Amino acid sequence: MLFLFDMDNVLYDYQWRIRMDRLTSVTGHDFHELRRRWWHDDGEWAAEAGNPPTGVEYLERVNRALEADISVPDWLSHRRAGMVARPPIIDVAREAATHGDVAVLTNNGALIGEHLGEIAPELVDIFGENLFATAHFGARKPDPMVFQRAIDHLGHSASQTLFVDDLPENVRGAQTLGITGHWFSPQQSAEELRSAIDAFIARAPQLG
């Protein structure tokens, strides 16, 4: 079995505006200008789909777009500043790891993907090297291709995979492949997620 978890707003509370406020203080661009310059189809969304393929190229494009000179440590620090770990949910992932493989799949570009262990250190002892940004797989959620490439890489079938995400459209993308999807709503508790995982484990022998 494979338990595939989204990172932001599942394992962590992600407060994007904190990150953006920090970038405003560095670049002088307000929230709307930052979005206009980078957070769009040809910027961040393309990067989350693997274009560019490396962290070095990613930061070069970011700095060019923002007319800035942000270093790798600073970019990671700004990202981490908007993240607050959710220990009860992380504990559920730890329990899932006793029943099968676990992995993280987060919509992020190559730079964050190369440093997930640094910005999400609470996950390393549970997920090990199975911390992936979508850029690793050349597509971004909810594209079914990213799920197929991820489970192929991890050596699991769709029918034996449970995917947890806070965005319904991402869950639907996974479900098109036969992956069992679980929408993690904003009000959901750790116990409710645990129950969903237990139900999947109970059904797994019948899923093939």
Image (cartoon, grey):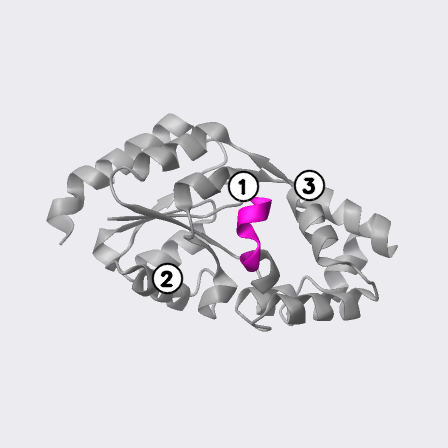
Residue bounds of the magenta highlight: 113-120
- Is residue 77 visible in the rendered image? The answer is yes
Q: Which residue does the image show at 51% across and 32% down from the upper left?
A: 86
- Asked if the stretch drawn in magenta spans residue 158, the answer is no
> Label 3 to label 2, Cα distance in Å?
28 Å
User: Residue 169's spot in the image, x, y percent?
Assistant: 44, 55
Q: Is residue 14 above or below residue 86?
A: below
Residue on which the image places disc 1: 121
Which is nearer the N-term, disc 1 or disc 2? Answer: 1
Amino acid at the residue labelled 1 = Pro
> Label 1 to label 3, Cα distance in Å?
13 Å
> What label sits on residue 81 in the rendered view?
3
User: Residue 27's spot in the image, x, y percent?
Assistant: 85, 56
Q: Which residue does the image show at 51% across and 37% down from the upper left?
A: 122
User: Residue 195's spot in the image, x, y percent?
Assistant: 29, 31
Contact, mark 3 vs mark 2 (Cβ under 8 Å): no
Q: Is residue 1 left or right of residue 190?
A: left
Is the magenta region chiefly helix, strand or loop? helix
Amino acid at the residue labelled 2 = Ala
